Image (cartoon, rainbow, N blue to C red):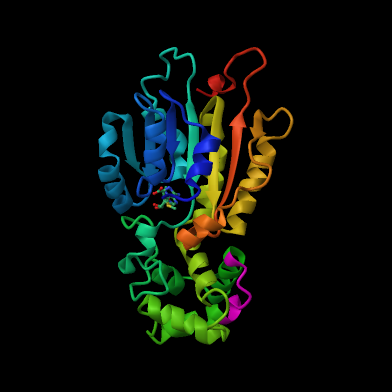
Amino acid sequence: MPVLAAEVLRLLAPKPGEAFIDATVGAGGHAALILRATAPDGRLLGLDRDAEALAVARRRLAEFGARVTLAHGEFRDVAIRAREFLGGEEGSGAARPGVDGVLADLGVSSLQLDAPERGFSFRAEGPIDMRMDRSRGPTAGEVIAAMAERDLADAIHDLSDERHARRIARSLKAAVSAKALKSTRDLADLIVRATGYAHGRAHAATRTFQALRMLVNDETGNLALFLDAAPGLLRAGGRLAVIAFHSGEDRVVKAAFRRLTEPGAGFDALTRKPVRPTTEETTANPRARGARLRTIVRREAEDGETPAAEEW
Ligand SMILES: C[S@@+](CC[C@H](N)C(=O)[O-])C[C@H]1O[C@@H](n2cnc3c(N)ncnc32)[C@H](O)[C@@H]1O
C-alpha cells in the first residue's frame, strides 16, 4: 500500500473523467488508486527521474491502457510535461484548462532503498552512488571526492541537522585520500567511528546518508521549482498534495503553501496541520513513519471564470 493512501484519496478527491499528475510515480501505487477512482476515462501523467521505477510503473499501470502517460524527467519540469500531456486541450478552447490534481510523494522509494547496487542504503554493501537518475550526474562518491571539506561539512549539516558534520566531513576526506571509501558499508562504518554513536534510536549514518542523497539529487532545488510551477497547472477546484519525509522538506512545503493561501493568492488549505500516518500504518510499514501530507485547493473564481486560464 502506498504511503497515506486513504488520506491522499480523501484530499485529492479524484472523480470519474478527471486529469491528474503524479509527479513522483515510483512503483505506481498512488497512481493506480487515482486511475481507479477516475475510471472510465480519467487520465494521469506519471513522472519519475528514475528510469527503473518507470519500468515498474509501466508494468503495474498497463491495465489502464491509454489513460496513463509516463515520462522520464524531473518534477522541476512539471509545467513543460503538463503542456505536452494536455497538448490537445491547449488552445483548443477547452472550457477548463489544466488538471484536477497534482501529487508529489517525495524522497526515496522502496525500490531504490532495497536495491544495494543503487547505494541508498547504509544497511547493505553497494557502490556510493545514490543517484535517482542513473543516466546522468556525479555519484555520491564523486561528490564527496570533489567537494572541499568545509563545503561538505556545511552541506551535511544544513541538509540533515547532523551535529557531527565537521568530524564526518574530515573523516570522509581523509578516507578518500587513503582510497578507503569504496562502498556504502565503508561509508556507514566511517560515520559510526567519526560520531561515536552507533546505538541511538536511528543508525548513526541516517542523517549523513539523507544529506548526501539530497545533495546528489539536488532535492532542495527541485522541490522549490516544483512548488513554483505546480499550483499554476490546477483548474479551479484542483488540488495539490505533497508528502514530505523529514522536517526540513516539510518546512519548505509549509512556507510555499502559506504564501499560496494568503488572501488573494487564490488557494485554500485543506490541511491546517500536516496529516501523519496512523500507528496502524507505521506498524505495517515503518518507512511511512516520517510522512507528512499537506494539501491545498485552487479557489473557484467569484465570477465563475477559471483563474488558471490566463496562465494557459
Ligand atoms: C516515495 S517514491 C514514490 C512512490 C509512489 N508514490 C508509489 O506509490 O509507488 C518517490 C519517487 O520520486 C522520484 N523522484 C524523486 N525526486 C524526483 C524529482 N525531482 N523528479 C522526478 N522524480 C523524482 C524517485 O525517483 C522515486 O521513484
* Residue 11 x, y percent position in the rendering: 55, 37
Specify the quadrant of the image occupied by residue 34: top left
Near-viewer residue (159 or 7)? 7
Q: Residue at x 53, y 83 (%)?
A: 198
* Residue 178 x, y percent position in the rendering: 40, 87
- As drawn, is 117 to the left or to the right of 170? left
Count the labels in the image.
0
- As drawn, is 256 to the left or to the right of 152? right
Specify the quadrant of the image occupied by residue 238: top right
Of all residues, the one furthest to the front in this rendering is 280
Q: Is residue 165 magenta?
A: yes
Residue 246's place in the image compared with 173, above or below, is: above
Near-viewer residue (111 or 70)? 111
- Res. 205 in view: yes
Near-viewer residue (36 or 252)? 36
Specify the quadrant of the image occupied by residue 25: top left
Q: Residue at x 25, y 44 (%)?
A: 59
Magenta range: 160-167
* Residue 140 x, y percent position in the rendering: 42, 68
